[in-house]
Image (cartoon, coloured by chain):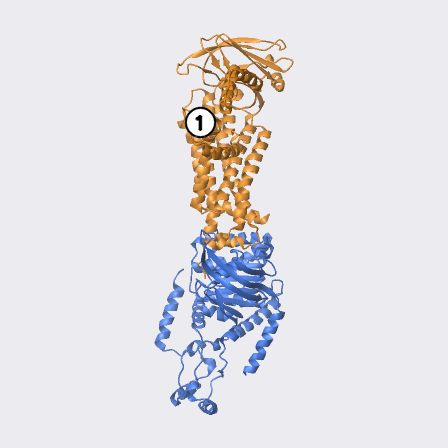
Chain colours: A blue, B orange
Amino acid sequence: MIAQDQILEKEESKAQETKEVVVSVRGLTKIFKDFWGRPKAKAVDNVDFDVYKGEVFGLLGPNGSGKSTTIKMLLGLLNPTKGKIEIMGHSPKNVAIKSRIGYLPEESYLYRYLDSRETLEFFGRLFQLSEPERKKRTEQLLEMVGLSGVWNRPVGEFSKGMQRRIGIAQALINDPDLIILDEPTSGLDPIGCREVKDLILTLAKRGKTIILSSHLLADVEDVCDRVVIYYGGKIHAMGTLKELLSERDMIRITTPLLSKETLKKVIEIIRADVGEDKIKIDHPTQNLESYFLEVVRKAREQAIETSGAVSQNVIAEYLRGDAETSPEEKTEKLLEKLAFKKEEKPEEKKEEKEEPKIDESKLEALATTSVKPQEEQPQVKQVQKPEVDLEKVNEKLSSLINKPK
Amino acid sequence: MQRLYAIIWLTWKAAFRFRLIWVISVLLLASVVLLPLIIKHDGTARGFTQILLTYTLSSVTALLGMATLWLACGTLSRDIEECQMQLIAVKPIPRWQIWIGKWLGLVSLNALLLALSGACIYGLLMYRSSHLSPKEQEILKNEVLVARSSLKEPPPDIKPDVDRILESKLKTMSLTPDEIKDLRKQIEQQVLAVHQIVPKDYRREWVFDASRVLKTAKSGRPIYMRIKFYTAQPDIPTTYLCIWRIGSDKSPRIIEFEQRLAGETFHEIPIPADVIGSDGKLVINFINRNPVALLFPIDEGMEILYYEGGFTLNFIRGLLIILFWLALLAAMGLAASSFLSFPVAAFATMSIMILFFSSGIFRSAIEEQTVMGVDHETGKPNYPLIDSIMLPVFKVVFKIMNLAQAFSPVDNLSSGRTISWTDIGIAFGQVVVILGGIFALIGIITFTRRELAAVQTTGG
């Protein structure tokens, strides 16, 4: 198994060598100086990395670790003290190359007095989009981020989450090849977070390169192909999530529910090679995000009104790359997308909260569950948590959903 | 072009959404409408119109000037401090275009406000003048609501006389170089006095090349002598007998008349255009029969004003010069905010503006050849070292200031003088291209080199 992994890794690194480098960073250092030119803080310290076309690249690290400083140097907003940056073979200061970049800063630095449509129109003009194209994209983006109903309200009146959404929309107005997102899910509700992550995956599928900075580990884990982990301005780890996260001395088998006898046999076979204390058997659980989304979906079906952002769960046509296709082809693509989404969200691999020891009573309990047919049981009810807790969560989430923004 | 337009549009949007434009508009209208109700004048329609023009145009210029500086400092430095500039700078627009876009936004905004205020002032003038008696209307039409050019005698060449007198004096005296310098100054003043002073029972003659005025003569419009004189008794309120003889052997007619006039103030005296000689010369003689000498200053003692065009176009040209000043202030504010925070930029630019208003200090320092003053006993500078450093600086600053201050549209409009298209061209070159260009260059270079994200470095 280990040998097979090594072969796969070698193939991956070979593939990377042949891939087009979109961002190249070598020896990047940034020292902030005081008024007298004396060094004050070393924000980034001799950093090297490459980002390849079509990958989602994560910059991970705690606050103040140098992620945002790196991003600002990539965008030409800060000058490196040392080192070299190339964006698609050009300096970050090159004006022409900026037409292929989309940027979402960590705070939504928007003009408070413009409404959301004016904001997108303004940025569209900076990209010299023709008027019909600008208007088309503006409408599609507003629809995508769920703000088409509140387009005439000044951005200054928006909640943080709504400002974030309009920030994401402006970053995509030019259909960029390289998208740099600094804390993209900060301030968003779980639905918004999921939508942003879905959007990132869709964009990556279209061959867009995405650099994502976050200290939210779940965000990075859900969407990134490769990550670097910053601490104190230095890179402490870099690689694919598989390289960084897989425990090579352990395996996990997931199957549909088994009868007590079969389960017993399997455990017996394993026991022959591994000590009992090293075997763990439980039901896979979905994470809180999936659970939340399910509750919200149900609430929506009951048509509960909200004055905030209303997610349409659609991605702007021009960003999907199917603007010119016929309705039949669109249906096909939608089905394809849905299938792809399912593959992209391996929920069953998520957290295993409880680690019960293998004993007969537990085995009995696990096997008895199989009496009920799986189809009749909604996924929500499979979560192994006390009934009381679930009710509390339900109440809290329902109150959150009904709470006006 | 679309990018530039986007930045201009943004500047306008900010001004309208922050209600600044409405506040300024109300203040401008108040100054235009309310000022005429409270100002004092000499009781004549001419005096009232002159004061009205001076006060309203000056207050509009001051109000718009302050607002321009405030807006220019705020629009860029606030965008940088509040990080919106980061979102613009990562888009495919060169930073110089952002800077120019902001400047054009401010200039166009000023153009609109100035046009509105100008239209109000113009409307008010026309409305008021239409309610005057035909005689007063005629006076206004000929003396204020008109564009008149002027003729002046070329300044006398005093150098040969000064050299000759100095030479003769030096033959009998032995002086140090500094003393020779002082003596030369004294002689210069004496020679100038000869050209300016008309002693008791003496005559002074002015000769103008008035060939350009012949067109006016044909149209039958009068020409004007604009005179001002001083006496040795400024504290005694009295009038002085002025005897005039205008015309020469070559002119169709010669006129002679007497009048009593007050000193230290301007007088405009109409004279028929046919006193100009066939050779194009206009000869004016003044005879002083007063018990004291009268002094006609070389620069403003005697001037001939003649009709050149209507008031409307002249008024528009006057407003154009004011717009050039506002464009310069916008460039100054943007240049300061390219590298300073909003309050510091506002303070710095206001200080420069005050400096501009204090040009008299610079002029007197340069004329006296000392910044720190002289010891009255020895006649030598108190701090020659400081003077040697500061005087060249003062000279340069004064020259730069003069590029903008050489134009006085408000004075010209209120005295019915022409602001020619040549003046407009020169004003545009000096105020907008040279001075504005210097500030633009400083602003664009610093803004392009500035680390826009350095104001917030604690992200992650």
Residue occupying the far front of the picture: B174
Pinpoint residue A329: horizontal percent, then vertical percent: 62, 68
- Residues B250 and B354: in front is B354
Pinpoint residue A156: horizontal percent, then vertical percent: 44, 53
Residue at which label 1 appears: B380
Please give the count of numbered marks on the rendered protein: 1
Residue at image coords 40%, 81%: A355
Q: For the residue labelled by badge 1, is the local secondary structure a helix, a strand or a loop?
A: loop
> Which quarter of the picture shows residue B372?
top left
Label 1 Cα crowd, 10 Å radius (few <14 / some 14-19 / many 20+): few
- Residues A263 and A137: in front is A263
Pinpoint residue B398: horizontal percent, then vertical percent: 50, 32
Asked whether residue B62 is in view, the answer is no
Q: Chain of mark 1?
A: B
Q: Amino acid at mark 1?
A: Lys
Pinpoint residue A159: horizontal percent, then vertical percent: 42, 58
Residue B133 position (above or below residue A37): above
**Left or right of B248 on screen, residue B289:** left
**Left or right of B177 on screen, residue A369:** left
Residue at image coords 48%, 55%: B453
Question: What is the quadrant of the C terminus of chain B in the image?
Answer: bottom left
- Residues B52 and A273: in front is A273
